[in-house]
Image (cartoon, rainbow, N blue to C red):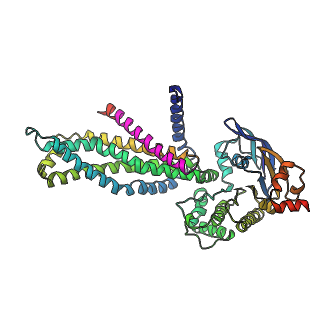
Amino acid sequence: MSNIALEVYCMKGFGKYIIFLGSLFVRRETFKTYYTLTLEECVQIGVKSILLFVLVSTFMGAVTTLQTGANLVSPFVPRFIISNVVREMTILELAPTIMAIIYAGKVGSSMSGGLGTMRITEQIDALEVMGINAASYLVLPKIVASILMYPLLVIISGICALFGGYLVGTLTGLLTPTEYIYGIRYSFNEFFITFAMVKSFVFAFLIASISSFKGYYTHGGALEVGIASTQAVTTSIIAILLADYFLAYLML
Amino acid sequence: MIKINNISKSFGDKTIIEAITGGFEKGKTNLIIGASGTGKSVLLKCIVGLLVPDTGNVFYDLRNFTETDKEMRSEIRREIGMLFQGGALFDSKTVEENIMFPLNILTTMPASEKIERVNFCLNRVGLEGVNKKMPSEISGGMKKRVGIARAIVNNPNYLFCDEPNSGLDPQTSIVIDELIMEITHEFNITTIVVTHDMNSVMGIGEQIMFLYKGHKLWDGTNKDITHSGVKELDDFVFTNKIMKSLKTN
């Protein structure tokens, strides 16, 4: 594909995505309908992801503590710096961004696969024939639920990562509980929490909307549903990394 | 009554259907027939608005469906029931929830009335006691019946069936066909069935439109179809031995 053709292809795709987002807000159903659907999606997206987030974050915090400890070998660097580094890494990058990639893999592929299957089995057509705006009915609750649940998952993830670091740091004798807690509290910048939350809102929106977009416009058969799921995860990850860069550039 | 006027649809350079004009009468089972790939399903999707025709108009009882605004189109769609080829039941919902779905979305009926209506429709299609089953737990024929129940639950004025017999055994096919015809007469609705099954054509084809390579070549009833004088239609009708023997006799 030549450069111009690629640019046209990308612009067409982006334009279609914007039109898709616009279509979510026309011919809406009643508030009650969306409320019920959003709660269902919150359970599906959020509650059912807690275990994975707890597990991954705890180990991530533990490993970060060990690796930071292994690198800080100078006797002039106090040990509490280990937990200080773990805190900064967790809040700024590990909890919102790395977990977003895991979230895209779990929730994004599921959204895309679900919508893709609905498309090829004519369930979306069935909704349209009933006079329902299928995009709005199916996708809007997913996006809202994602925006509500992902920041909560990031908070849980941050807490678990710091707890994992604490467990490993103290149990291996790398640093004392007092040193760990001191490092966590030392030179704390509250704005980083705001920054992490802004990132989590943006990533949640990107993952849910991109994955739904890919799934909604699937056509073909089972093979295409698989391709759409893969594309959903890949595109979401690229969007996360780009958004991560721009947010850091703008806010820090 | 549904009228179509000069409907054409292309995908890229390929013309699927061209300049199709015709009418589908109320209280009758209207069939669109033709070999695979002649554009039957595309025509049906143009009629229900799942595809936008390149040219032409569709009229639902004199209401121009093609050129109306989104609100009006949505209104007309709420008078439509459709049975899809694979049933198109929502996987995550039970049979009862599937049938109740249009009522939940489109009406403000109390819950007890909704359940009553769902049970009435299930009885009407000959299914009882399957309310709590998931679509994955029922057979293909049952899925089609549930699809019909969902299509009629909101008292539609128009019923569309896309290949209602595909994947069914001959006996179940006849049951589904008869059910569609009974419902059409009982509720006096305009029914359009897309099929290439000759048993359906002979059994329920009160009004038939024959498509060949994207063009309408003939229309008439199942009584006239064996002596239409159209070669392409004869080739389609007399493909199996039983029909051939009928022609010889």
Look at the picture and state if A24 lies above or below B121.
above
Q: Residue drawn at (76%, 63%), measured in percent from left and top?
A: B181
**Residue B11: percent from left, percent from top:** 67, 39
- Residue farthest toward the right in the current orientation of the protein: B249
**Residue A206: percent from left, percent from top:** 43, 42
Q: Is residue A195 left or right of residue B248?
A: left
Query: What segment carries the magenta color?
Result: A221-246
What's the magenta bit mostly, secondary-structure-wise? helix
**Residue B156: percent from left, percent from top:** 70, 58
- Residue farthest toward the bottom in the current orientation of the protein: B129
Q: Residue drawn at (52%, 31%), measured in percent from left and top?
A: A11
Look at the picture and state if B176 lies above or below B224.
below
* Residue A80 is one of the magenta-drawn residues: no
> Dividing the image into 4 quarters, which one contains the C terminus of chain B?
bottom right
How many numbered markers are drawn?
0
Q: Nearer the viewer, residue A250 or A105?
A: A105
Asked if one can make out residue A185 in the rendered structure from this viewpoint, the answer is no
In terms of image quadrants, where is residue A187?
Answer: top left
- Residue farthest toward the left in the current orientation of the protein: A75
Asked if one can make out residue A34 in the rendered structure from this viewpoint, the answer is yes
Q: Is residue B81 left or right of residue B211?
A: left
